[in-house]
Image (cartoon, helix red, strand yellow):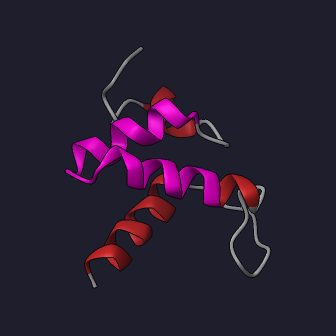
């Protein structure tokens, strides 16, 4: 598996694979347990926002998630 989060093949898949989410969180120095919480939370929402819109860029959603952890 290519672990480069900048690789387009890594980014484009929606929904993402759990392994890809873990790699991305690890690259941002966020614990893998938090990656799992993020992944399963959004999986339960069928990869939609809380307002029901489909998530198109899981990395953007992950960045927002990580920002909220720190603030």
| Image position, residue 45 (x, y; %) | 75, 62
Q: Residue at x 59, y 39 (%)?
A: 16
Q: Is residue 26 left or right of residue 19?
A: left
Q: Position of residue 54 (x, y in %)?
A: 74, 63
Total labels: the figure holds 0
Q: Which residues are magenta?
A: 17-41
Residue furthest to the top in view is: 1
Residue 41 picture location, percent across and down: 63, 60
Residue 47 visible here: yes
Q: Is residue 31 magenta?
A: yes
Residue 53 in the image, given as x and y percentages of width and height: 76, 71
In the rendered image, the quadrant that contains the N terminus is: top left
Instruction: Inspect this view and state whether residue 58 appears.
Output: no
Assign the magenta stretch its main secondary structure. Answer: helix
Instruction: Identify whether 67 is placed above or below 22.
Output: below
Figure quadrant of the C terminus:
bottom left
Q: Is residue 58 left or right of residue 33?
A: right
Above or below, 47 relative to 68: above
């Amino acid at each position: 598996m290519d672990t480069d989060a900048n690789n387009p093949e890594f980014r484009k898949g929606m929904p993402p694979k759990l392994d890809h989410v873990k790699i991305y969180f690890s690259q941002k120095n966020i614990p893998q347990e938090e990656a799992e919480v993020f992944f399963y939370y959004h999986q339960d929402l069928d990869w939609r926002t809380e307002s029901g819109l489909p998530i198109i860029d899981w990395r953007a959603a992950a960045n927002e998630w990580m920002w909220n952890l720190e603030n």
